[in-house]
Amino acid sequence: MRKNLKFESWFFYVLFFVSLVLSWFFHKDATRFSDRSELWSDRAGYYIYLPATFYYHFDTHKMPADLDVLTGGGFSLDTLNNKIDTKYTYGVALMASPFFATAALVSRIAGYDNEKGFSMLFMRMMSLAAVIYLILGLWFLKKFLDHYFQPVVSFFVILMIFLGTNLFYYSLIDGMMSHVYSFFLFSLFLFALKRYQGLESRRWFIVLCITLSLAILIRPTNVLLLLLFFGWDAAGPAEWLNRAKTFLKPRFSLSFLSILFIIFLPQLIYWKYLSGNWLHFSYRGEGFTNFFHPKIAEVLFSPVNGLLTYTPLVFFFLAGIFVMLFRKKQNGWLVAGLFAMVTLICASWKMWYFGCSFGQRSYIEYFTILAVPFGYFTTELFNIRKLWLSVALFFLLFLFAYFNLRITTSLYRFERCYYGSTWDWDHYVWNLQRAGILSPVCQVQTWQNDFENMALSPVFKPSQLFSRSGQYSIAANEKEGKTPLFSARLDAFGYPFPKRMDVEIWALKTENQPADASLNYTLTRGNEILFGDEQPLDGFIKNQDTWSKVKKTFIIPDVFDSTLQINIFITNPKRTHLFADDLEIRYHYGWE
Amino acid sequence: MLLALFLLGVFILVNYYLFYLDSHQTPDTIERVEREILPLQFEGGGSRLAFHDFEWGNIHDTASHLAEPGYFSKQSLKMNSGVPFSPGLWIKFKDIPSSLPKRIQSPVSPDSVATDDNSIWIRAGGFVWFSCPPADLKCSLVATCNHNGANYKYMFVGLETENLISNQWNYVSIDYRVPSPADPEDVLQAYFWYRGDGEMLVDDVEVNVFTEVAR
């Protein structure tokens, strides 16, 4: 036992040290206002509460006028109404506040310019905060898993979750996102739940309430955790009912509501300051708009941030759920139901791929719960007698962890967004080749854009009026009559460049008269057009309000300048109501 | 578990090895050249688009770059670094004789997708004479299309790889399937391109166009 504890301490010390080094490595090139910084885009949106409270006192006039732009647009400054507008809640900022205070104190003692909360010291401290919450989260998870599994299984499970899931990325690279904080809260909740269930102690109930309230504050859908309070390790429906009755007793329910209120109060005050109302839906234009046609297949399997396509280790989590159900283990149905609910929630969200993400990041906190089926699976795996099966499954486990680490490194080296289409498998495979998972890197064969991935949108805002697939299409009514659809430099292909490309796009017009529009292609050097061709659309779009396929083979000349750019666009000089969707390009590297 | 880790190591090493092999391949432009061969069903359906026997000029006029002898004739063209390109074919797509399939004249029509049924071929060829070792002969027989100065479907036969014989006349040709042009104003070209510092003679440069022979 003592030996185990000693090993456990060393295990977490080493994990902490390695994480710290990796976090430093991933942020070594970060500058104050760059996308590599912890205080950029969404991360800045979570963080802004701290400098706004302690340095600027929520007065935009005291802030640099373009601070919102400099930090990647994660929040906005409304100087007219003197408001700082962030759609994120203050939970992450609250949890990061001790690190913020330390950075402020060190700055003051050392006489170091704190840049009002945006110096490099604050950024480093936010990276450190993520590492600390990661290690604490893993530690609490290990303690929780020890209730069910041998220590070796618990160690194996937390190590695989760390190395084999996007938790690695969202704690060591994008640590100021909410996920590592939620992961910590979920782990603490599970740990506290076991303590509460064992001791029936009011102290642990308070810990549960604080943890749950913070988790709900950070992400309201985390209210699902409440299900665990009622159902975790429950022998049957009667015990569910008993726990519900206990919870509804005034001393319990009022304690929970009071803590929830206290934790939410600063948020309510912020919303009142921002909108004039105590309650405010900050995700304008978003929401659960896909609830009646959830994008479940996309969330699980799409090349654009699909759960299983980017975190294949989850296959083993799901296998563990089947093991639990098959072996009639406690909590099997609860975990399966929870996974289904989380999937439904993610699939109902309008932007089901969650923007520029790595995989389905909304599942990260739920990996704490899925660790239990994974633990059961691992236990079975350790007991498999057939050598070939055992080796094959372990090989897959390690391969999936390797997969995760290579993709993470690729995201660090290249861009953070995924620039592919919903079901563009060619681009996915190319991405794996670029990440070094598959070799060698092959020539790009196809390109698709269904205009669902906003990172790939050729225009500022795609249209929702008509769509052939998904939710969006491109309205060909941009200024000057030219609507871009695609552009790529020749160096994106590698030498030799393609010689021809078959372009297919679906078009729809809402008027009965000829549109005089055309599908155009140019090859340009700067503003100079070297080569061009066009395909008039009227010959293809015969019927009004019907999607028609437009096809054309364009020639790419034999050039040696890789900086030349291919452009495909629609010219619509009369700006008639014309929509385009589902662009597909097939490249030919020869003339055969 | 250790065996699985070992297998993962093997997987990673194999990947790195494949990547290493791929990144150390030096593309040989000659080897990468595509070669097209006129299909049998087109043989015999040819008509002449251009012919140059170089018999018309005065050999004593240095500006004409002519030399003696020719291939079973008096004169030929002397190519060197000052005369790198021979006469050959230079014709706009819109000027290709109207007896040829419609695809050539209406390149932007929606049904202008090239198929085996309506394709057109040219065969460009000529006789060459040189005295240097065959491997040192830096000359190409080129067929290409040109749109506003930019070449596409640029294909060539490198004479240094054609197993020719020094100090005698050798026949060289290239078959070329004519692509759908981007514009009727695009130009179809075929010519010899001498890239060396020495000299070479060229004679009877001929370009024929082929459409499928009805069976």
Image (cartoon, coloured by chain):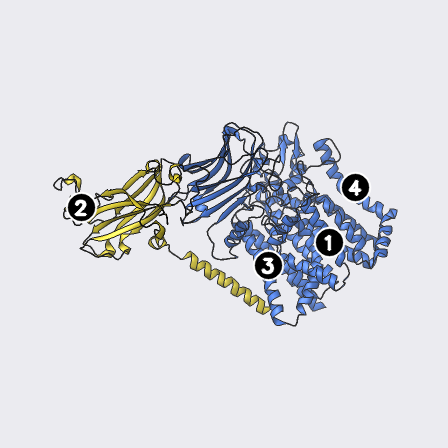
Confirm whether circles 1 and 4 share one chain. Answer: yes
Q: Check whether the beta carbons of the residues at disc 1 and disc 4 lie within 8 A of each other.
A: no
Q: Is residue B212 left or right of residue A46?
A: left
Label 2, on which residue?
A: B76
The secondary structure type at the circle numbered 2 is: strand
Q: CA distance from mark 2 to mark 3?
A: 71 Å
Reading the chain from its start, which is encountered first: label 1 or label 4? 1
Task: Find residue A223 and report its horizontal and vertical position in percent.
Answer: 75, 47
Percent coordinates x, y for residue A107 in the rendering: 61, 43
For label 2, count other residues whose C-alpha is less than 10 Å away and answer few (under 14), some (14-19) or many (20+).
Answer: many
Chain identity of mark 4: A
SS under mark 4:
helix
Q: Nearer the viewer, mark 2 or mark 3?
A: 2
Q: Residue A237, located in which quarter of the rendered image? A: bottom right
Query: Marks 3 and 4: which is nearer the front?
Result: 3
Which amino acid type is marked by label 3?
Ala
User: In the rendering, which numbered label is found on residue A261?
Assistant: 4
Nearer mark to the viewer, of 1 and 2: 2
Alpha carbon separation for disc pair 1 and 2: 92 Å
Q: Amino acid at mark 2?
A: Ser
- Horizontally, residue B25 falls left or right of residue A344, namely left
Question: Which x, y percent locates residue B186?
Answer: 35, 37
The residues tagged by marks 3 and 4 sit, at their Cα atoms, a distance apart of 41 Å
- Same-subunit check for callouts 1 and 2: no
Contact (Cβ within 8 Å) of mark 3 with mark 4: no
Residue projecting furthest to the front: B215
**Residue for point 49% across, 30% down:** A516
Instruction: Identify the residue position indicated by label 1 in the image.
Output: A188
The residue wearing badge 3 is: A401
The front one of A294 and B99 is B99
